[in-house]
Structures are given as structure tokens and as C-alpha cells.
Amino acid sequence: MKYMFASDIHGSAYYCRKMLEAWDREGAERLVLLGDLLYHGPRNDLPREYAPKEVISMLNARKQKIYSVRGNCEAEVDQMVLEFPVLADYSVLVLDGRTFYATHGHVYHQDHLPPLMDGDILIHGHTHVLKAEQMDGYILLNPGSVSIPKEGNPPTYGIYEDGLFRIRDFEGNTIKEMNL
């Protein structure tokens, strides 16, 4: 099964369209959103084509294939307009026998770990910085940010398939990859 992971849309209709086009092109069966879907947040500049109502419409149209977790910018009002659950602090996915602990990253991250077993995978967004690293006892993944990347990175998303995690830009270039 092929999964797409994306984080930090921050209400950008432009980058939400790019993300959904990439999802279609990749042929992933599910999209796992790692939070900060609609609001840009007080620390961020407005992203390109900031239009949360358009983002709502685009995501709701695909609600059957989306899993999502709550980012630090999500609120109850977001759940009122989005037709799929967005307020869970984390989601545990078992893919190809591997346990993925998916969260936004503002509560659980490499300096404050959730309950992981050796070999588990912690995947989060929040930092807007892509990452795929073997840590002491676990793997740390971050697909980067869809709309407001940091540290000179391009807008990116992650693809997991057959034990391989790839971080790609919207032109389909692989920026980083890791065998899990």
C-alpha cells in the first residue's frame, strides 16, 4: 500500500492544489495530513493564495481517503468545517508491519518522545524542515512543509511504499529517501 504524508498547508489554496495533484500523480491510496491545515498561525507570514475556504472544499472532496492529526493551529472551529477528523493528537498506523506514530510535532518530537518501541517510526511536521534519520532506537521522519518550508527547503511531501520513504518536491524530484 502506498501512503502520502503531508504537513503544514496553512490555508494555502495554491499549495493544497499542488499537494492534491502530487497525490493523484503518485497514486497513493491514502493521504495522512500531519496538522496545520487551515490557519497560517501568528508566527508565519501568509502563504501563497491564503484561502482556507478553498482548502476546506478541496480536502472535504477527498475526505474518505484522508487521515489527519491536530496541529498547533487547529481548533474546534476547524472540525466544524472539515468533514474528516482533525482533532486527534496522534494516529498510530501499522504499514508493512512497521508502526508509525503520526503526530504534528508540537507535543511529541525528538526531544519529547511518545511511547515508542525499538524500530518504531515517529513522523511529524511542525518544524517545516524535512528529515529522515535513524535515531537511537527509532526512525524520525518529517515530510517538510507543503506551503511554508524553512531552512532553504522547497515545498515537499513524503511517500511511503514497500519499506521506502521518499521526500519529494512538487516537480516529483526526490529530495531525500530512506529505507525503513
Image (cartoon, grey):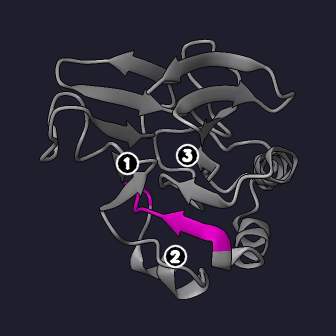
At label 2, counting other C-alpha atoms closer than 10 Å, the crowd grade (few under 14, some 14-19, many 20 or more) is: some
Marks 2/3: CA–CA distance: 16 Å
Residue bearing the label numbered 3: 7
Residue 123: name its quadrant.
Answer: top left
Stretch of the chain drawn in magenta: 65-73
Residue bearing the label numbered 1: 97
Q: Percent from the top left, x then y, of residue 161?
A: 61, 40
Marks 2/1: CA–CA distance: 33 Å
In the rendered view, does 123 fall on the left or right side of 29?
left
Q: Is residue 67 located in the magenta-colored stretch of the structure?
A: yes
Which amino acid type corresponds to the residue marked 1 in the rendered image? Gly
Q: Is residue 86 located in the magenta-colored stretch of the structure?
A: no
Residue bearing the label numbered 2: 78
Residue at 65 percent of width and 71 percent of height: 65
For marks 3 and 1, give the one nearer the viewer. Answer: 1
In the rendered view, does 15 fall on the left or right side of 97?
right
Q: Percent from the top left, x then y, of residue 94?
A: 38, 55
Quadrant of the image containing the C terminus: top left
Q: Nearer the viewer, residue 102 or 145?
A: 102
Which amino acid type corresponds to the residue marked 2 in the rendered image? Asp
Along the polypeptide, which appears first: circle 2 or circle 3? 3
